[in-house]
Image: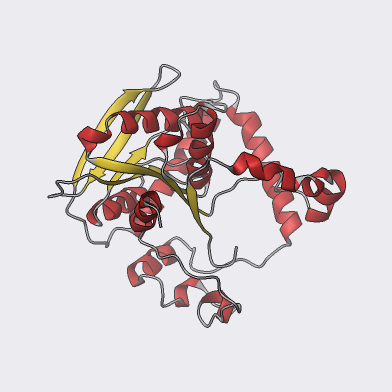
């Protein structure tokens, strides 16, 4: 294992396993019991389960069909896009702010009883690529003298909502720091930002500006290597930063990627058979795409239990 490989594995706190000859047998979770609900899942933190009960999220609704759900979601998405484009629509802006506040309250409730790690915290406001301000939330371990790996965290929220100050993401960064790593959470412009709208690539630009700043100040921050990380939309951004690093001929910025349930395909409202019929070259030419994947850092992707 090379030095970079060792840093990557050490940073994520995982071990490389040999290929499994036979599929593993699952006895826990919904893979073991399809009828299991979150309220009854003993693997979850009791305080967290109690919090989601108050929000009515402890169970699940009856499925209405995958395609039907996707179509309904797409219709809602298009409606929101039309509304948010009207920057003078005060009612729409207020609705977005209310949704954001509710999501933040939920995030705070989920970690309300979690222990507070003893770490050092600071913020840094830098200039973005578009002349805007980008805030970096920096969590560092105490008593560390030698350079340590850095987790550059892009928060979840579908690139449309939430922010690094949400309780879940704040706690996650502090836990990384308590484990001996520097964690930098980037605040990027989102779809539901009342200062918007912020069309692409505003979100990626903010993440890229923050990444460049962290790389430039790695000595001051006590950083050895940088791992981009995120969940859901943040996972997509973590991957995008590695790709952008290659395109911009700055591959040294990203040593590895940790993506939790990223979303990387933009046509999620159509059935697979339709895609195969409409875009046959996706399969016919897929082997020609492998060279484009060269020169990229290692990636560790984690998905949820039923994905």
Q: Residue furthest left?
A: 143
In the drawing, does residue 294 fall left or right of residue 288?
left
Q: Nearer the viewer, residue 53 or 244?
A: 244
Q: Is residue 68 above or below residue 235?
A: below
The x, y position of residue 93, in whole percent, is: 51, 30
Q: Residue furthest top?
A: 131
Q: Is residue 171 above or below residue 48?
A: above
Tell me which residue sits at (36%, 55%) in the image. 6
Q: Nearer the viewer, residue 181 or 219?
A: 219
Residue 297 visible (yes or no) = yes
The x, y position of residue 202, in whole percent, is: 51, 26
Q: Quadrant of the N terminus?
A: bottom left
How does the figure colour the protein chain or chains? Answer: secondary structure
The x, y position of residue 279, in whole percent, is: 82, 44
Q: Is residue 102 above or below residue 38?
A: above
In the drawing, does residue 290 fall left or right of residue 103?
right
Tell me which residue sits at (57%, 28%) in the image. 200
Tell me which residue sits at (27%, 61%) in the image. 114
Q: Is residue 169 above or below residue 292?
A: below
The x, y position of residue 256, in whole percent, is: 43, 47
Q: Nearer the viewer, residue 284 or 190?
A: 284
Q: How many marks?
A: 0
In the drawing, does residue 212 fall left or right of residue 247?
left
Q: Residue furthest front?
A: 2
Q: Quadrant of the C terminus?
A: bottom right
Residue 165 visible (yes or no) = no
Tell me which residue sits at (46%, 46%) in the image. 156
């Amino acid at each position: 294992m090379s030095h970079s490989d060792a840093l990557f594995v050490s940073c994520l706190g995982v071990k490389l396993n040999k290929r499994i000859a036979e599929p593993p047998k699952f006895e826990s979770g919904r893979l073991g019991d399809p009828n299991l609900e979150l309220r009854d899942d003993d693997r979850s933190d009791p305080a967290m389960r109690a919090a989601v009960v108050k929000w009515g999220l402890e169970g699940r609704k009856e499925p209405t069909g995958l395609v039907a759900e996707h179509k309904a979601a797409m219709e809602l998405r298009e409606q929101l896009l039309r509304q948010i484009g009207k920057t003078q629509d005060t009612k729409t802006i207020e609705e977005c702010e209310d949704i954001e506040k509710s999501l933040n309250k939920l995030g705070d409730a989920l970690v309300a009883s979690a222990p507070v790690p003893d770490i050092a915290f600071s913020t840094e406001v830098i200039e973005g690529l578009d002349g805007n301000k980008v805030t970096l939330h920096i969590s560092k371990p105490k008593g560390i003298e030698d350079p340590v790996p850095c987790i550059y965290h892009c928060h979840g929220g579908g690139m449309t909502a939430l922010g690094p100050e949400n309780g879940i993401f704040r706690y996650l960064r502090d836990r990384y720091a308590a484990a001996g790593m520097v964690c930098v959470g980037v605040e990027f412009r989102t779809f539901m930002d009342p200062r918007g709208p912020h069309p692409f690539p505003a979100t990626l630009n903010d993440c890229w500006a923050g990444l460049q700043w962290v790389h430039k100040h790695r000595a001051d921050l006590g950083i050895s290597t940088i791992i981009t990380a995120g969940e859901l939309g943040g996972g997509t951004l973590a991957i995008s930063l590695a790709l952008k690093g290659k395109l911009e001929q700055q591959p040294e910025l990203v040593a590895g990627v940790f993506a939790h349930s990223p979303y990387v395909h933009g046509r999620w409202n159509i059935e697979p058979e339709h895609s195969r019929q409409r875009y046959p070259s996706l399969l016919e030419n897929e082997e020609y795409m492998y060279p484009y994947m060269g020169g990229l850092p290692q990636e560790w992707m984690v998905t949820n239990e039923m994905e």
